[in-house]
Image: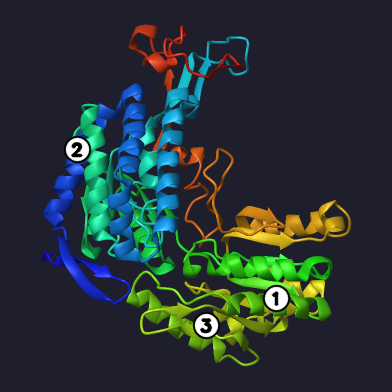
Amino acid sequence: MAAAPVWSVDPRTGKQREQVAVEATAQEVDAAVRAAHAARGALADRTVRSAFLRTAADQLQAAKDQLVEVADAETALGPVRLTGELARTCYQLRAFADIVDEGAFLDVVINHPDDTATPPIPDLRRYKVPLGVVAVYSASNFPFAFSVPGGDTASALAAGCPVVVKAHPDHPALSELVAIVLRRAAAEHGIPEGVLGLVHGFEAGVELVKHPLVTAAGFTGSVRGGRALFDAAAARPVPIPFHGELGSLNPVLITEAAAAERAEAIGTGLAGSMTLGVGQFCVKPGLVLAPAGDAGDRLLKSLTDAVSDIDAGVLLDHRMRDNFLAGVAERAELPDVESPVTAGAGGEHTVSPGFLTVPAAKLASEGEHDLLLEECFGPLTVVARYEDEDEARSVLSRLPGNLTATVHLSGAEAAGEGRGPELLAELTPLAGRVLVNGWPTGVAVAPAQHHGGPYPATTSTSTSVGGTAIERWLRPVAYQGAPEALLPPELRDDNPLGLPRRFNGVLER
């Protein structure tokens, strides 16, 4: 594997700005993984781990001005958006530090022997241990929150797993700077800098997922790239868990009663959600089922007015821009597809938002319109007009798995009248997060959050956002008949670490 330069590129012009690094060779990937593997012991102490995560958050926040400046130069996402994303990332690191301190994620269960049970129960003690080195593949659209310091990295470190990150080519300079900050935070707590490795290059990413010391991987990106890595992870002599977020249409169903009640508000809200971040959010609503008729017409007028007022924006790179323009054109050429607001080139380096409409009947069965059921990354959505509930239900039945599914109900439907409960039940199999009378853009970092869904939204049932994301990097182990003196402190009767646990069937906090 020959080394090649890694350039920082200005997305506003497409021009190279500076050479940041070189693509990692197979030997360099091996060295990064082995350094991470050697750092495992330094993460064993939960107190050290949580302190490291908090220091990392503090130092990222302290470097905010420089980090945001570099991030904006590489992504054109804007200082306001990037400052908020960095704050979210720091909050996430601190939230995982709290989880580490609490210790409930270890899921400690102790059963003393019981000869009266059938069959008899021996002395059993179970908890969770870290898997080992985790490979993290950065996302393009969130240079902080789903990149080097993002949720995969934070949750893996919280679990006690060192990390090697494959940097995204859209923000290599930022990736290098953030890695320096995180390593500096690690060093403050006596943790080797190798606890966080960073490599660049496509081939390096392939080498990383195949490395025998890598025990799991987290990925956020395209279906094509994610599926290739997923297959490589499964094809290893020792397969590993691959937690990939690949793609999502994020359908929205608007009932006729909801449209009649507040068509204008729904249209305006949809415009804001589908164009947020120039349509580059993984939970952008890409397919909207809206009623035909007067209420639906009012909704479309509101959507048209709102989208028409939104300025053109810069996508993350010119490859994405080219793919977006080609995807819009291919979809717009389909029979019976109309463009009330035409999405396309807003300028030499920008794109303008828009939306397409199509009769829902065209999507109810397999055919050439199936392209409209695939994600188009950028500020575009498809509004499918349905004539009746059966037509809408037929389209829903054909959708693949999604991160989110949304239903907009009338006040009466939301109160449980009519088909409100039934619609919620119909959407639940489609997605990991089901919304009522809201918009999916915006993924709160909260204990109850679930950011995942049926394939191809994700390749596992886990979440990449929220406290339970830590579970991806752990495995359970049970000790049977082990003398107290040999047990790890987490499993001893006297509970020297003060952990929440289930002791002989009783939950202790």
Mark 1 is surrounded, within 10 Å at the Cα level, by few (under 14), some (14 to 19) or many (20 or more) other residues, namely: many
Rounded to the nearest angstrom, the CA distance separating label 3 from label 2 is 46 Å
**Front-most of residues 92 and 508:** 92
Disc on res. 302: 1
User: Relative to residue 63, is residue 251 depicted above or below?
Assistant: below
Question: What residue is pinned by disc 3?
Answer: 343
Q: x, y (%) of residue 55?
A: 32, 32
Rounded to the nearest angstrom, the CA distance separating label 1 from label 2 is 53 Å
Taking the spot 58% from the left edge, 70% from the top edge, the residue there is: 286
Q: Amino acid at mark 3?
A: Ala
Question: What residue is pinned by disc 2?
Answer: 193
**Front-most of residues 214 and 48:** 48
User: Relative to residue 191, is residue 336 depicted above or below?
Assistant: below
Secondary structure, mark 2, is helix
Rounded to the nearest angstrom, the CA distance separating label 1 from label 3 is 17 Å
| Disc 1 versus disc 3: nearer the observer | 1
